[in-house]
């Protein structure tokens, strides 16, 4: 499995209702997408929960590399690139990905990025991430948890899809609204 995310920073005066409408009108197009586990349509509004800018930042969990490849070379990503410019796409190898049956009900997401120093045992960290994810999913507010690492930057990315925004947010975390969650196909 792979994670994928791109973040499009939008002008301060950009009407975020355009993004909300885009999600509402086009979000269903990724329902049942081959190779996709889920896509969370994430966006941030400047000033909300510490957001420093308006942004559109969808997060994908791919079951297959072929699904990710086909999406990136397909018409949906071409349309996004035509509207906003081709974004830098971050991807990572999944250590943990679990979601509940009602994951599509998520309305908030938290993303945390942590360095993986050279002295870190990757096997031990992988086991710790499995424990982290299972613990997170015990909370009724948590609908999905994923943890992945990028071996080109040695960066760990964690994401939680939540029903409600968290009360406390660590300084290193990004909080997003979730406009929609599309569940993929086989």
Image: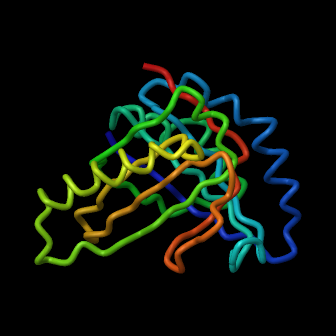
Give how far across and how far down residue 33 sits, in percent.
53, 26
Q: From the viewer's perspective, tell me whether residue 73 is left or right of residue 131.
A: right
Tell which of 134 and 89 is nearer to you. Answer: 134
Number of numbered discs on residues: 0
Q: Nearer the viewer, residue 167 or 159?
A: 167
| Residue 49 sits in quarter | bottom right
The residue sitting at 52% across, 71% down in the picture is: 173
- Residue 122 lies, with reference to residue 98, above or below; the image says below
Image location (x, y in percent) of residue 135? 38, 49
Going by the picture, which residue comes out furthest to the top? 186
Q: Is residue 83 above or below residue 65?
A: below
Q: Please name the colour scheme applied to the rendered image.
A: rainbow
Picture coordinates of residue 38, whole percent (x, y): 52, 35
Residue at 80 percent of width and 38 percent of height: 24
Quadrant the N terminus occupies: top left
**What x and y, as percent, mark residue 147?**
36, 53
What residue is shown at x 63% (from left), y 33% (from top)?
104
Q: Is residue 9 above or below residue 58?
A: below
Residue that appears at 24% across and 72% down: 116
State left or right for residue 52 relative to residue 90: right
Q: Where's the C terminus, which quadrant? A: top left
Residue 104 lies left or right of residue 22; in this view the side is left
């Amino acid at each position: 499995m792979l994670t994928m995310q791109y973040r499009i920073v939008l002008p301060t005066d950009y009407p975020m209702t355009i993004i909300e409408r885009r999600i509402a009108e086009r979000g269903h197009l990724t329902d049942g997408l081959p190779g996709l586990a889920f896509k969370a349509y994430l966006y941030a509004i400047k000033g909300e929960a510490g957001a420093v800018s308006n942004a559109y930042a969808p997060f994908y969990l791919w079951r297959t590399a072929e699904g990710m490849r086909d999406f990136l070379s397909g018409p949906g990503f071409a349309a996004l690139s035509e509207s906003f410019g081709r974004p830098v796409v971050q991807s990572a190898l999944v250590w943990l990905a679990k979601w509940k049956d009602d994951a599509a009900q998520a309305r908030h997401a938290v993303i945390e990025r942590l360095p993986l120093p050279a002295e870190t045992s990757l096997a031990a960290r992988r086991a710790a991430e499995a424990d982290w994810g299972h613990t997170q999913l015990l909370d009724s507010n948590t609908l999905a948890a994923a943890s992945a690492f990028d071996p080109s930057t040695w960066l760990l990315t964690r994401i939680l899809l939540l029903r409600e925004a968290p009360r406390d947010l660590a300084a290193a975390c990004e909080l997003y609204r979730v406009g929609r969650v599309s569940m993929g196909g086989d």
